[in-house]
Amino acid sequence: MPTEPFRVAAAVYGILRDRGRVLLIRRATTGYRDGQLSLPAGHLDGGEDAVTGLVRELREELGIAAEPHSCRLALLMHSAPERSDDNEYFHLFFEVDRWTGEPFIAEPGKCSELLWVTASALPPDIADYVAAALAAIGRGESLLLRGW
């Protein structure tokens, strides 16, 4: 029996750093990992490249204007489906070196808290795959396979 071709489900994540800290958001009322800490992130829209999608998501979630040329791909995570009705994913984690504006909760219906945390001491309630991605980036890895 032939297998189905892989159809990309892609999400982009922004890693904003300041004085050894990284900015996390607390997910809320989205139906996915609510209550857990994560990075600002979102799905790509059709016809949208990864950097444009990241810049859009950072504007929508944090009210900041990221400079596209300052968004550097740090890690590609290819994850297996978490549930039987889920997709496999490409998660693209970007270091964002420059932005304009002070981050704030611009989507209070999806986020209940912004938190700057020490990058070397992540809180225990961070989403496991985000913690794994940040650890891989810290080790200098550029590809992480998860759940296979």
Image (cartoon, helix red, strand yellow):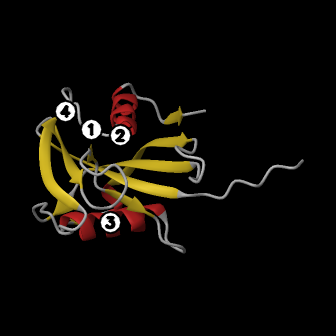
In the rendered image, the residue lying farthest to the right is 1
Few, some or many C-alpha atoms within 10 Å of disc 1 (few <14, some 14-19, many ≥20)? Answer: some
Taking the spot 45% from the left edge, 30% from the top edge, the residue there is 141
In-front residue for pair 146/33: 33
* N-term-proximal mark, 2 vs 3: 3
Residue 64: % across, % down: 19, 66
Q: Secondary structure at mark 4?
A: loop
Task: List the residue tagged with mark 3.
Answer: 57
Task: List the residue tagged with mark 4.
Answer: 123
* N-term-proximal mark, 3 vs 4: 3
Residue type at tag 1: Ile
Residue 96: % across, % down: 28, 52
- Residue at mark 4 to residue at mark 2: CA–CA distance: 11 Å
Residue 66 visible somewhere in the drawing: no
Q: Secondary structure at mark 1?
A: loop
* N-term-proximal mark, 3 vs 1: 3
Few, some or many C-alpha atoms within 10 Å of disc 2 (few <14, some 14-19, many ≥20)? Answer: some
Residue 91 vs 66, above or below: the answer is: above
Mark 2 and mark 1 residues within 8 Å of each other at the beta carbon: yes
Residue 61 visible somewhere in the drawing: yes
